Image: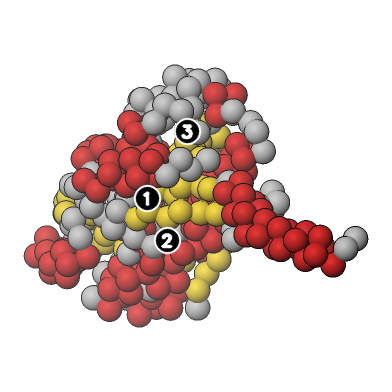
């Protein structure tokens, strides 16, 4: 090859490199991650989601990209965030939390969607059936609301002398708050307890809630499963310990932070399953053909240090059933 031809060949090849790199980059699938919550309180959940992707061969930044959209507890932002992901033509939308799933469903009928919800997907209108979802959406549901009565029962087992129990809801999500309150009231009647419903729509309301508990003479607090409270679980657990209130919620972070009792489905496991579903779609499976899966892993954590500080003796049968105790 003559020197002049060689230089022209090398120059042409070098010029093509950036174009090839851009083509490779554009070919990388993109996951749109849409949530009503904020990232800080959901780090263990997003880590479980990414780990499931990695276990299926998809590593963020290497062969898959993730575009995160967090509504920061402002539900009204979700439609615009969902529309932005659709405009960017992401490969699939992962929509944990009910509000995010509904916003994603309203935004597109073409892009595959994987939801994670504590509600009934059929009642919410997300899918036509659990076995054959149909359309462009499938996902994971939890036993979240169904375990509210059991959480109250476990709290009663731990505090048999308490006659008044408070139940914390977020009225900003009427679907969860109304369903949770109804189930808790029914369970309280069976257990012979008086249930007082208290409300918080943001972190700023929490101190006022704990002030209210003293006025209500509540012997304990059970918290309704809600994305707001999940994102604040560690902080609420610490606040309940500091204010001397026996409290129960779901998620390891709550008991680890100082909350007395954790009882409920594993939200990290639900996010892991959502990651598995997302990976399946990236590999070519269609949402319509992937049955909705129920996350049935139930966790019980007890903070014995908090129990001791509150003067509560944890029954041996209860501590024996715990997945973990914090001492």
Q: Is residue 290 left or right of residue 119?
A: right
Relative image position of residue 66 (x, y in whole percent):
51, 54
- Image vertical order of residue 169 relative to residue 104, above or below: below
Q: CA distance from mark 1 to mark 2?
A: 10 Å
Which circle's residue, 3 or 2, is located before the other in the chain?
2
Numbered disc in front, either 3 or 2: 3
- Which of 170 and 196 lies nearest the eye of the viewer? 170
Q: CA distance from mark 3 to mark 2?
A: 25 Å
Q: Quadrant of residue 291?
A: top right
Q: Position of residue 85 (x, y in %)?
A: 40, 44
Asked if residue 281 can be seen in this view, the reply is yes
Instruction: In this rendered view, identify the residue nearer to me: 307 or 243.
Output: 243
Question: 234 and 19: which one is in front?
Answer: 19
Q: Earlier in the sequence, mark 1 or mark 3?
A: 1
Residue 35: mark: 1
Between disc 1 and disc 2, whose residue precedes? 1
Disc 2 designates what residue? 42
The nearer-to-camera label among 1 and 2 is 1
Name the front one of labels 1 and 3: 3
Q: Secondary structure at mark 2?
A: helix
- Local crowd at mark 3 within 10 Å, few (<14), some, or many (≥20)? some
Q: Position of residue 233 (x, y in %)?
A: 36, 64
Q: Which residue is mark 3?
A: 111
Tell me the CA gap for discs 1 and 3.
17 Å
| Nearer to me, 135 or 17 | 17
- Give me the residue at 59% from left, 58% from top: 60
Crowd class of label 1 (few under 14; some 14 to 19; many from 20; radius 10 Å): many
User: Quick check: marks 1 and 3 in contact, CB under 8 Å?
Assistant: no
């Amino acid at each position: 090859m003559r020197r002049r031809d060689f230089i022209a060949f090398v120059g042409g090849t070098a010029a093509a490199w950036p174009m090839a790199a851009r083509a490779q980059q554009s070919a990388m699938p993109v996951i749109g991650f849409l949530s009503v919550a904020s990232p800080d309180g959901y780090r263990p959940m997003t880590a479980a989601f990414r780990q499931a992707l990695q276990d299926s061969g998809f590593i963020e930044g290497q062969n898959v990209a993730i575009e995160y959209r967090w509504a920061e507890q402002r539900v009204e932002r979700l439609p615009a965030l969902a529309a932005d992901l659709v405009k960017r033509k992401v490969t699939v939308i992962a929509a944990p939390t009910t509000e995010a799933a509904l916003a994603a469903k309203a935004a597109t009928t073409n892009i595959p969607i994987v939801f994670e919800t504590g509600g009934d997907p059929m009642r919410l209108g997300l899918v036509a059936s659990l076995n054959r979802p149909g359309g462009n959406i499938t996902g994971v549901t939890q036993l979240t609301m169904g375990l509210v009565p059991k959480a109250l029962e476990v709290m009663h087992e731990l505090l048999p002398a308490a006659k008044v129990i408070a139940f914390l809801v977020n009225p900003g999500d009427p679907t969860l708050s109304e369903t949770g309150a109804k189930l808790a009231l029914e369970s309280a009647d069976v257990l012979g307890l008086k249930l007082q419903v208290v409300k918080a729509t943001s972190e700023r309301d929490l101190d006022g809630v704990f002030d209210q508990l003293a006025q209500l003479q509540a012997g304990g607090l059970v918290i309704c499963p809600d994305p707001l409270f999940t994102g604040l679980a560690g902080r609420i657990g610490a606040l309940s310990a500091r204010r001397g209130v026996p409290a129960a919620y779901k998620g390891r972070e709550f008991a680890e932070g100082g909350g007395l009792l954790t009882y409920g489905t594993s939200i990290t496991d639900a996010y892991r399953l959502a990651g598995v579903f997302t990976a399946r779609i990236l590999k070519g499976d269609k949402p319509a053909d992937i049955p909705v899966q129920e996350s049935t892993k139930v966790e019980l954590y007890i903070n014995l240090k908090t129990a001791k500080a509150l003067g509560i003796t944890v029954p041996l049968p209860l501590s024996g059933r715990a997945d973990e105790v914090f001492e």
